[in-house]
Image (spheres, rainbow, N blue to C red):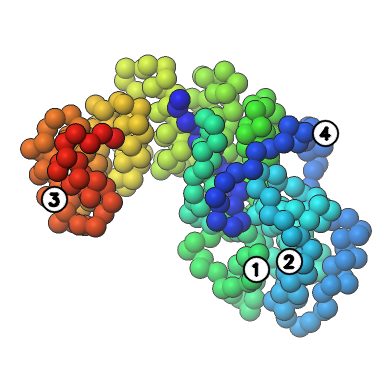
């Protein structure tokens, strides 16, 4: 079974597993979402904030007071159910998206200069049925004496700004809606997911991961043509978006398009993607699908892009060994070993050549 990748902002802590969405958890209706503000506060929340935070000369000190109070209030981390700020306050359950909206909403009400942040790197990939969820981390930041600090649930610390991107309120809301769509998709309701992804794109059409998610939902709903268009549009926004390439590859190969790999390589060339990582990932995906000739093409492209990559050299060597070309495989191992003798894939190739009967 081919996996489809969706991208969700689900992880505040290290993501180990995903909690299935209960059947009773229905996606919000269009009426509920229209004009919907996930950062909206109730009068009770406002009164609580005033009671917990004492005005000081320092925004940072007030933010620390608020964070400590919220740590006592919200006690259960709940992956897979994205709520509004008011939902978190009422249920005392949160994930990184909902907690970020709660913190930013309350802190701004108190007059603090806070904003949304998102980690640049993925937090991990978790499989759930035929879906593989790429988890990203969303947080909040505060300006302190001209310096940005990043909120984490247990503390506030100086931001390693290269690791985070600042989000506009509109983009943060689009990611909130996209999370709801991802949860609907996990819950087996692609129609509801499509509606939520489309609403997210109305808020911010510039996020490639939402186009990827829309494509996944369209594919599950049987609209293959629209799914392909969504994946390709994601790649126009970010030519290095690996989930878009993988989902497009899965779709093209599932349709048995003879020139699928040619199309993918052409996309990589047109986009001038010089990073071998995308080719390595596509090669790994092709190998899992037993498309060994396609895998070899992607690995060779990765080697051409970066001959100093032990991963690329070893990956190509593994395919060569698998297809009976042990002589060239040994030459690849020799090159890869010089580059990094402790690399996991290099060691795998060494084991394979010592024991040719080993299977993938």
Between disc 4 and disc 3, whose residue precedes?
A: 4
Residue carrying label 3: 335
Between disc 3 and disc 1, whose residue precedes?
A: 1
What is the spatial separation of the Cα atoms under label 1 and label 2, in whole angstroms? 7 Å
Between disc 2 and disc 4, whose residue precedes?
A: 4
Question: Taking the image as drawn, is residue 199 in sight?
Answer: no
Element marked by disc 2: helix
Residue 339 — which label? none
Q: Quadrant of residue 108?
A: bottom right
Across and down, in percent, residue 195 comes to 69, 30
* Residues at circles 1 and 2 in contact by the CB criterion of under 8 Å: yes
Residue carrying label 1: 154
Question: Taking the image as drawn, is residue 350 in sight?
Answer: yes
Q: Residues within 10 Å of mark 3 (few under 14, many from 20)?
A: some
Residue 71 — which label? 2
What is the spatial separation of the Cα atoms under label 3 and label 1, in whole angstroms? 46 Å
Viewer-proximal residue among 60 and 136: 136
What is the spatial separation of the Cα atoms under label 2 and label 4, in whole angstroms? 32 Å
Residue that appears at 49% across and 61% down: 163
* Quarter of the N terminus within the rendering: top left
* Residues at circles 2 and 4 in contact by the CB criterion of under 8 Å: no
* Residues at circles 2 and 3 in contact by the CB criterion of under 8 Å: no
Which-is-in-front pick, marks 2 and 4?
2
Which-is-in-front pick, marks 4 and 3?
3
């Amino acid at each position: 079974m081919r996996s489809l990748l969706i991208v969700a902002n689900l992880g505040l802590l290290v993501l180990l597993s995903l909690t299935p969405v209960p059947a009773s958890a229905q996606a919000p209706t269009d009426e509920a979402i229209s004009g919907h503000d996930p950062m909206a506060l109730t009068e009770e929340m406002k009164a609580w904030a005033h009671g917990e935070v004492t005005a000081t000369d320092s925004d940072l000190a007030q933010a620390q007071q608020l964070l400590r109070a919220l740590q006592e209030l919200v006690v259960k981390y709940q992956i897979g159910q994205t709520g509004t700020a008011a939902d978190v306050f009422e249920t005392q359950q949160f994930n990184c998206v909902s907690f970020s909206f709660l913190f930013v909403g309350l802190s701004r009400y108190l007059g603090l200069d806070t904003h949304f942040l998102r980690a640049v790197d993925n937090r991990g990939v978790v499989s759930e049925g035929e879906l593989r969820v790429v988890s990203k981390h969303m947080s909040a930041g505060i300006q302190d004496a001209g310096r940005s600090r990043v909120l984490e649930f247990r503390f506030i610390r100086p931001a390693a700004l290269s690791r985070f991107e600042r989000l506009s309120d509109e983009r943060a809301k689009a990611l909130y809606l996209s999370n709801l769509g991802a949860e609907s998709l996990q819950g087996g309701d692609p129609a509801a997911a499509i509606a939520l992804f489309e609403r997210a794109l109305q808020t911010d059409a510039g996020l490639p991961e939402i186009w990827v998610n829309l494509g996944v939902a369209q594919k599950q709903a049987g609209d293959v043509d629209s799914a392909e268009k969504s994946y390709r549009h994601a790649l126009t926004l970010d030519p290095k978006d690996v989930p878009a390439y993988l989902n497009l590859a899965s779709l093209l190969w599932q349709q048995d398009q003879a020139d699928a790999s040619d199309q993918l390589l052409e996309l990589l060339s047109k986009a001038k993607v010089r990073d071998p990582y995308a080719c390595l990932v596509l090669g790994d995906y092709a190998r899992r699908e037993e498309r060994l000739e396609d895998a070899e093409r992607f690995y060779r492209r990765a080697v051409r892009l970066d001959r100093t990559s032990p991963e690329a050299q070893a990956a190509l060597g593994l395919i060569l060994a698998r297809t009976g070309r042990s002589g060239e495989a040994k030459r690849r191992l020799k090159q890869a070993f010089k580059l990094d003798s402790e690399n996991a894939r290099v060691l795998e190739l060494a084991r394979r050549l010592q024991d040719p009967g080993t299977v993938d």
